[in-house]
Amino acid sequence: MSELRRLAVINSDAKRAPVLPDPPGLVAELVEPRLRRFARTPYEHLLTEVGTVDVAEAAIVAGCDAVYIDTFGDYGVGRLRAATSVPIVGAGEASLAWAGQLGRRFSIVTVWPASMDYLYAERLSSCAGGALAAGVHYLSDETELHRVGTDAGVKARMARGETDVVDAISAACLRAADRDGTDLILFGCTCMTPVAAEVAGRVGIEIGDPSVVGLAAGHAAALAATRPAPPTGRLGAVSALVDAYLGVAAQSGSNCTVEDDGCEVCAVTLGTSS
C-alpha cells in the first residue's frame, strides 16, 4: 500500500478542521503558526509573512509533500518558492486562477475595510485571473480592525451565523453584482467560509469560497508532488529569526514586544523553540 501524501494547511483562521474531506491517498494536517499577526497595514504584513514562512519551513522539514496557505493574502508564497521546490499553494492565487479559468468577469466581496485595499491590489496585479476582477467591495468600516479577535468582531459573528452579518454580506454581494455587471462573486477572505452556503442560497449568484478552492488546489499539488521531496534549499533562516524573537520576548517577561491584537487567530504567540 502506497504511503499517504501529506498536505500542511497553515491555519490562518483558527479553523477546527479542513473545509474539505481528504481525498484518497492524502491527509491534510492543520498547522498553527507560533508567530501570528493580522496584516492590517503593509508594515504589519511583514510580520504576518515571517510567521507564515516559519510554520511552513517546519512543515517542509517534517516531510510534508506540499504546503497550503489558507488566506487570501497568500502570505509568504513568493518567499517560500524562492527557498524550496516543495509545492506552495495560496488561497488567493488559487481562487483567482479558478475565477479566471471560468472566463467571466467577477466581483470580490470582503468583510474587511477599504484600508486593506493594498492587499487586494497586490494579489490582483500579481496573480493569473486578477485582470478579470471588476471590483473589490469592502463590507466594514475602519472600526472593524479594532474588533479583530473579539466576540464582537466580524469573524466571530460569521462563525456564530448571526443573521445581521449574513444579511449584510448578502446585500453587499447583490450590490457588487449590480454595480459591476457580474454574476460571479469571489469572497475576499478565507474567514467567510461559515456563511458561504447561506449567502449563495440567498443571492442566487455563484459564490467562490477561496478556502474551498484553495484547499482543493492544495490537495492536487500534494498528490502530484515528486517523491521523495526535493532538497529544501535555503530554508532555515526565518525559523532561526523567529526562535530568536520569541526567546528574547519570553526572557523579557513581556506578553508581547509589539501591539497585541488580543486574538488566538491574529496575535503574536510567544513560546519557546522546539
Image (cartoon, grey):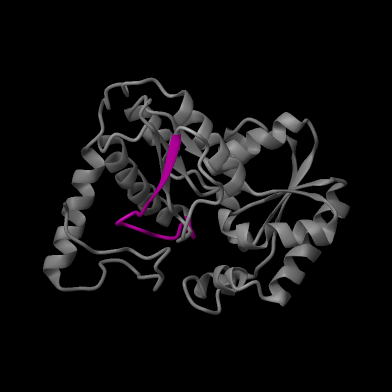
Q: Which residue does the image show at 77% across and 56% down from the upper left?
A: 200
Q: Is the magenta region chiefly helix, strand or loop?
A: loop
User: Where residue 170 sits: x, y (%)?
Assistant: 78, 63
User: Where residue 101 sits: x, y (%)?
Assistant: 71, 29
User: Where residue 166 sits: x, y (%)?
Assistant: 72, 69
Q: Residue furthest bottom?
A: 152
Q: Which residue does the image show at 34% across and 51% down from the upper left?
A: 51
**227 or 210: nearer the eye?**
227
Q: Quadrant of the N terminus?
A: top left
Q: Residue furthest front?
A: 1
Q: Quadrant of residue 235?
A: top left
Q: Quadrant of residue 53?
A: top left
Instruction: Establish if 75 lies above or below 138.
Output: above
Q: Which residue does the image show at 53% across and 69% down from the upper left?
A: 145
Query: Left or right: where does residue 66 sit relative to residue 24?
Result: left
Query: Left or right: where does residue 204 sit relative to residue 107?
Result: right
Q: Quadrant of residue 262?
A: bottom left
Query: Left or right: where does residue 23 sit relative to residue 176?
Result: left
State the extent of the magenta-drawn residues as a range.
26-41
Instruction: Establish if 237 lies above or below 152.
Output: above
**140 or 9: nearer the eye?**
9
Q: Which residue does the image show at 40% across and 30% down from the upper left?
A: 81
Count of numbered badges drawn on the protein = 0
Q: Is residue 145 magenta?
A: no
User: Where residue 29 sits: x, y (%)?
Assistant: 40, 46
